[in-house]
Amino acid sequence: MARRPAKAGGSIARGAGLALGEAVFRSLCEALQAGSYRAGDRLREEEVAQRLKVSRTPVREALGRLAARGFVEPAGGRGLIVRNLDISEVLELYAMREIMEGAAARLAAEHASAPEVDALRDIEQAFTEASETDPAEMARLNRAFHGAICRAARNRYLDNASRELQDWIALLGPTTFTVTGRPTTSHGEHRAIIDAIAARDGDKAENLARAHIREALRCRLKLLQKQ
């Protein structure tokens, strides 16, 4: 079994002009994506503040934003807990993901530069070399792969929406790369998408990307059946 990542720790670094509350919020979102927090985990202001070495005020602000987005919910006076999505929400999430990933691949086929295509191949090579005993690393590289496609699409609104969608995906728990055979099939799907983008074939890139997400959903449903 893959080792679960440790809770996010250490003080947070603020970029120029970045408010502390925003920095805490981003740190918590990154912790969700990394699997440091999972559905059912409890978040308490004091513990988060101590871990990030900040006061409770920006933590309260950040947790409020997470609650407003529906990522966390009250836990009976004992802080907040990370939400557990029901099956209908999972299906809705993947339906939107299929649309967005397809659009990103199509636009990337139109706009991606040669260095960006090369970068996609480099990420996919690293994904191939990652050990199947480390699904968390494969999941990280997979996020990097899809993020690179989205940036190559040259659409800031799609990029922003994709980032939020990744936060929701993080609530689903174990990566689909824990499903037997999924790393291998995903590798082939990734390569085909890259080739279509490199060939400037938007129709093919979109269709392949959408099929890739449908296969990811199939594996996700397998995982949910075991819970």
Image: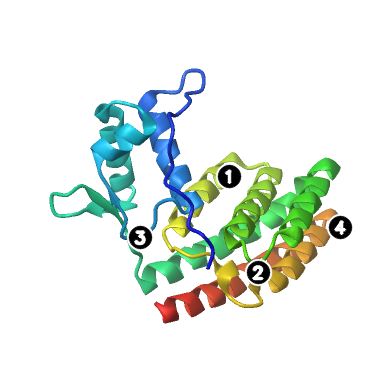
Identify residue for label 1.
Answer: 159
Res 199 label: 4
30 is higher (above) or lower (below) than 127: above
Quarter location, residue 81: bottom left
The span from disc 3 to disc 1 (Cα, nearest Å) is 25 Å
User: Is tag 2's residue or tag 4's residue first in the polypeptide sequence?
Assistant: 4
Horizontal and vertical percent position of residue 25: 39, 37
> Which amino acid type is shown beneath numbered disc 1?
Asp
Q: Residues within 10 Å of mark 3 (few under 14, many from 20)?
A: some
Horizontal and vertical percent position of residue 104: 65, 53
> Which amino acid type is shown beneath numbered disc 3?
Ala
Horizontal and vertical percent position of residue 131: 69, 62
User: Is tag 3's residue or tag 1's residue first in the polypeptide sequence?
Assistant: 3
Q: Residues within 10 Å of mark 1 (few under 14, many from 20)?
A: many
Q: Quadrant of the C terminus?
A: bottom left
User: Is tag 3's residue or tag 2's residue first in the polypeptide sequence?
Assistant: 3
The span from disc 1 to disc 4 (Cα, nearest Å) is 22 Å
Res 39 label: 3
The span from disc 4 to disc 3 (Cα, nearest Å) is 40 Å
207 is higher (above) or lower (below) than 36: below
Tally of numbered discs: 4
Identify residue for label 2.
Answer: 212
> Which amino acid type is shown beneath numbered disc 2?
His
- Residue at the farthest left position: 77
Local secondary structure at mark 4:
loop
The span from disc 2 to disc 4 (Cα, nearest Å) is 18 Å
Name the residue located 25 percent from the left edge and 53 percent from the top edge.
73
